[in-house]
Image (spheres, rainbow, N blue to C red):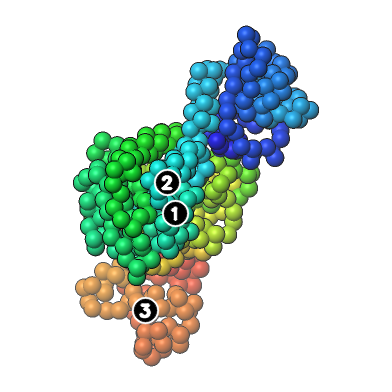
Amino acid sequence: MIRLERLVNVLGGYGVRLCGRPETRSAQLRSVAIPDATDSRVTGDVLVAVGAASVTEAVRWAVAAQAKVVLVRAEAGSERDAAATGNDQGVAVLRADPAVPWSHLVGLVYGLVLEGRETESGRGPTDLFALADSLADVVGGAVTIEDRLSRVLAYSRSQQAGDPARLETILVRQVPDRLRALFRSRGVFARLSSTDEPIFVEPDPDHGLTGRMVVAVRAGRELLGSVWVTCADPLTGAAHTALANGARTVALHLLRSRASADLERKVESDLVIRLLEGTADAETVVSQLGLAPQEMRVIAVRAHTAEDRHAMLLLAFDRATAGFGWSRPGRSALLGDTLHTILPGTRASAAREWVGALRAALPSRVRITAGIGGVAQAAELPASRQEAEECLALHERGAPQAEPPAYDESWDDILLQRLRAAARAGRTPARGPVSVLRRHDALHDTHYVPTLRAWLEAQGDLAVAAERLGVHANTVRNRLRRMSEVTLLNLDDPRKRLAMVITLAAEDE
């Protein structure tokens, strides 16, 4: 079961459009049907109108099939008529371009509707919770299914043998740090990584733990997660066997969930990359991503630990794309070693909150650095991306605990950063008054460059410049006179003064 909004989000990457009835985006879809001339009893939430000669015919079939949504191939420009026809009959119309093969569309629709579910991550098979319930009935204890980072994927309704530790885990959607530390100290995670046999974890009243049986969920050698059962004593006999078999069933569900999620991530990433590179019709792609036509920002993020610069970035991407469609605000893609997210809204504080939420979802040892681009319309997103990357570079050079810089608050630092990059690349004049004075200082141990800087920053006020230098105003006056004998300063010319300020800023590290 998925919501229509998610179906629209994925199919949008193939040019499919929802025509009218935007209020239906929250509709739950559980089944798919294809018209069958030999069976008039075909029903389903989504009707894939293969063979329909027109939108009108497709909608008529959908009404007969009691469908909420009909997918029909129709020529571009027919959206208004399709919306009107669907509105009249209470059916949401998805229009696909006739150039898109039915085989592609049918595979996508069946895969998404029949494999989808809503959980904390926003994707996966509906019956993972049902599986937890069934397993709880067999083993006689409350069941929790977790991923390899101890985040809760599903849990049983049963509260048999439930305890405070389980309740806290479900409430925060992941195993609390103190419990993870306890399990780690007892070697539970180490044993899970090396055996497929269920393990018993002794009770610990101080942690609200009555006891656990836990078994690894594995696909080949890869650890996907684990299944936990609350119990005061080790499971034996049929319950022990059921837990081991249940872990293998969970593995199949998680693998199918991953396949569905990867499809959505690929569609989303491709669209985001096209936006950030400026290679697409921006307004159209923003619509395909399910974003409203409003101002946005680009956020650039890097995540790593001292020992690993790649796995944590992939984990950050996983968390940034958890919950597809309209269930989260941003749209993300990986470009090189950087996660880029397009976030609707104009407030830099909202972007910082997004980064903070991402940081909180990652292990505490992961270092997160980020930069926030300026506010941009859809067509301006490539510029916001560059600004975000430059702000990211500022953050990486500063204190890691500092707030991520935003371009509209740090544009002056970005300008100076660009000037310094130009100077290092030899794109600024190599000779000029500042260069001459710098060489003179090096050869004769004078202080002409600091004096010029102080005078320019003081806007020609000798007293202020002298105070900054810690000397008498006459000393500054005499230095300026001698400096004019070394090189042509032209301090009365405002353009020359501006050029010297820029040169000093570009050469200042």
From the viewer's side, name the closer residue of 74 and 476.
Answer: 74
Q: Taking the image as drawn, is residue 70 in sight?
A: yes
Q: Which mark is residue 451?
A: 3
Pair 3/1: label in front: 1
Please tell me how many numbered marks the rendered image carries. Answer: 3
* Quadrant where the image shows the C terminus: bottom left
Q: Earlier in the sequence, mark 2 or mark 3?
A: 2
Which element type, helix, strand or loop, lies under badge 2?
helix
Q: Amino acid at mark 1?
A: Gln
From the viewer's side, name the closer residue of 151 and 289.
Answer: 151
When asked about the image quadrant of residue 187, the answer is bottom left
Q: Amino acid at mark 2?
A: Ala
Q: Amino acid at mark 3?
A: Thr
Residue at image point 44% right, 54% down: 160
Q: CA distance from mark 1 to mark 2?
A: 8 Å
What residue is pinned by disc 1?
160
When asked about the image quadrant of residue 80, the answer is top right
From the viewer's side, name the closer residue of 373 and 87.
Answer: 87
Pair 2/3: label in front: 2
Label 1 with label 2: CB-CB less than 8 Å: yes
Q: Position of residue 377 (x, y in %)?
A: 59, 47
